[in-house]
Amino acid sequence: MDLKLKDKVVVISGAAGSKGSIGETILQNLANEGAIPAVIDRNARGFEYVKELQEKGIDAIFCQTDVTNPEEIKNAFDVIIKKYDRIDVVINNVGVNDGVGLDASYDEFMNSLKLNMVSYFLVVKHALPFLKKSKGNILNIGSKVGLTGQGGTSGYAASKGGVLGLTREWAVDLIKDGIRVNAIIIAESWTPAYDAWIKTLENGEEKLKSIVKKIPLENRMTTPQEIADTCLFTISEKASHTTGQFIAVDGGYVNLDRSLLTE
């Protein structure tokens, strides 16, 4: 299926994670579709990823950016606009489940909000004049934690709840400009970070089995590739009349009746 993403300038934050992470997987799939990824991330790994793409003849750019710093975000957009003079899509993918709970300090809580939610606002704010010209669209990567809570992670939960609120708000705000805004909700996805977390647990294998048993469809975790596939479809013309939606790519984890799990 041709998603008609060729030569679309796609700004994506948080795409310089480890190989196999959700952001990196989305990045590779954007490149495979012929899009032009403009990566914003604080990890210098992004230079390596973009160099690999460029060596394959794929146009891409990396702006090393601390997305908690408004000035660095502005500078990144200055560089992107200077090179391309347009933006077609924004994918806000930053997210760190940082364990900032009720025992955290004010500064720790605010820093969590800045990383996991305020960065979304700032990225869209700088992209907006160009999205209006291109009648582009925005995709926010959300989490089940914003709907269900998790415990021990007030900053992340508040942020991801806020991201969903911003998704609906922006969908309303920008409908007059023909700009679609949607969110992907992720639950349990097997990423390098998830694998690393499981390995820190004394009973990691047992914990993993207990989680997988709670995922209704096929009792398995969602793959980053499945998430990337849905992301690319949602930002494409194939989803041209979809806006203000929370699209759960989670094997039914959040929304399906728990009676399905009765053994």
Image (cartoon, grey):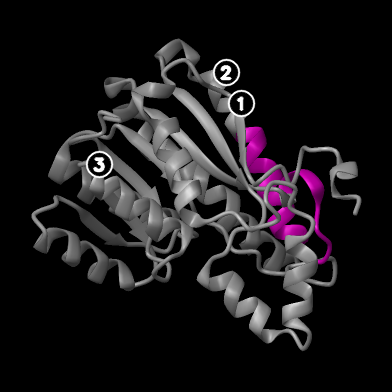
Within the image, what quadrant is residue 131 found in? Answer: top left
Q: In the drawing, does residue 244 fall left or right of residue 211? A: left
- Which residue in the protein does label 2 denote? 172
Viewer can see residue 105: no
- Which residue in the protein does label 1 denote? 169
Point 84% across, 66% down: residue: 102
Magenta stretch in the rendered image: 146-166
Rendered location of residue 199, percent (x, y): 65, 84
Q: CA distance from mark 1 to mark 2?
A: 5 Å
Judge whether 3 appears above or below 184 on screen: above
Viewer can see residue 235: yes
- Which residue in the protein does label 3 denote? 33
Point 35% across, 35% down: residue: 89
Point 37% across, 49% down: residue: 12
Name the front one of labels 3 and 2: 3
Name the front one of labels 3 and 1: 3
- Kindly check if marks 1 and 2 are in contact, taking CB atoms under 8 A apart as contact: yes
Please name whichever residue, 94 or 121, is drawn nearer the observer in this view of the structure.
Answer: 94
Three-letter code for the amino acid on which mark 1 is drawn = Glu
Instruction: Give neighbour class at mark 3: few <14, some 14-19, many 20+ (Cα, 10 Å).
Output: some
Residue farthest toward the top in the current orientation of the protein: 176
Counting every numbered tag in the picture gives 3
Secondary element under disc 2, as helix, strand or loop, is helix
Q: CA distance from mark 3 to mark 1?
A: 30 Å
Residue farthest toward the bottom in the current orientation of the protein: 202
Three-letter code for the amino acid on which mark 3 is drawn = Glu
Q: CA distance from mark 3 to mark 2?
A: 29 Å
